[in-house]
Image (cartoon, rainbow, N blue to C red):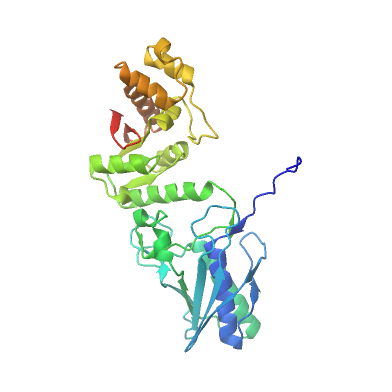
Amino acid sequence: MNGDQPAPLRSGWTTGACATAAAKAAFTALLTGTLPGSVQITLPRGQTPVFAITDRGRDGESVSAGVVKDAGDDPDVTHQALIVATVRRLPEGAGVRFRAGAGVGTVTKPGLPIPPGEPAINPVPRDMMRAMIFQVATDHGVAGDVEITLSVPGGEKLAERTWNGRLGIVGGLSILGTTGIVKPFSCSAWIASIHRGVDVAVANGFDHVAAATGSTSEAAVRLKYGLPETHVLDMGDFIGGTLKYLRSHPVPRLTIAGGFAKLTKFAQGANDLHSGRSQIDMAALAVLSGAPDLLGDAHTAKHALEIARQNDIDLAGRIARLGQARAAEMLAGTGTAVSLMITDRQGSIVAEAG
């Protein structure tokens, strides 16, 4: 590399920004008969990006236009997805209406920013599209009363890799975004999904919610308690953020589920369990076992657990009790009953507390 610094990570565009550009292009074509090759939109914070437009055709009194989403360097499941807006005019005074086309979901549960029965198009993207429709209508001296149908080819399949199923969004993806910009490798989208999952749980009166660090522990906690997918928060490494939000949005009962290594970090005081942001104190773990001579040579949490098991030391149980006590302290005064479950890599439960 000759000492060169790595190139900065590229930001990208939200599905909401792409949908707004597609809707502006489609409405322009509806009024002029010509689809523009590109359009400029205004984002909530004033930026004015330009988007290339893909022609999706005309069908009677409607025009469709598409934008290929560029999420920059963010590992977004919708990167390179085609976001299509189909626009048709409505009678004057009807306003701007939104519909979910193929690959865009519909909200079925309360607790989200959009009420049940509505297409899963969040408030900010709706506002952006209304603003662009008004701009185009004003430029051409016509009323801006239109129906916008958003679709994403293959969106229903892509949605299987998102939180939509457990949030009660069926049929496809959500059209999201608050700033219009996707920051690369941002944690904000994941944390926002955790918040929305809690909101759905509270709004629907779920009496038991689980928060899991990964798919293995999620499967184990669902099996043990018979929990549907909608009752499980995929918190990943963000246990601190999850508990912080639950403190102000409490549920009656919470089970934290995760692997031994991640929950050891939590028991030792970490709130972010990512390997790059927290580490296990192996010396403290050896002391906790009550047999530091035996565990002193352990180089990983997994290794320590294996040694403890071979010597009939309930190390996992001690971590479970410490972690449960810490979580209960963080949620003290909320009325939430907290339990904690540790699983191994095969999904077997190795310890529980609370």
Would you place residue 173 above or below residue 249 in this image? Answer: below
Give the position of the C terminus as an image quadrant.
Answer: top left
Q: How many marks?
A: 0
Indicate the position of residue 198 as horizontal and vertical percent values.
Answer: 38, 47
* Depth check, front residue: 195 or 174: 174
Would you place residue 236 above or below residue 128 in this image? Answer: above
Q: Is residue 9 left or right of residue 316?
A: right
Q: Is residue 282 left or right of residue 68?
A: left
Which residue is at 42% across, 10% downward?
293
Indicate the position of residue 285 as horizontal and vertical percent values.
Answer: 43, 19
Q: Is residue 146 left or right of residue 290?
A: right
Give the position of the N terminus as an image quadrant.
Answer: top right
Indicate the position of residue 315 as horizontal and vertical percent values.
Answer: 35, 21
Which residue is at 56% across, 73% downward?
22
Would you place residue 210 above or below residue 291 in this image? Answer: below
Furthest residue toward front? 2
Camera sees residue 353: no
* Depth check, front residue: 152 or 294: 294
Indicate the position of residue 153 as horizontal and vertical percent values.
Answer: 45, 70
Which residue is at 24% across, 39% downward?
224
Camera sees residue 73: yes
Which residue is at 31% across, 15% downward?
311
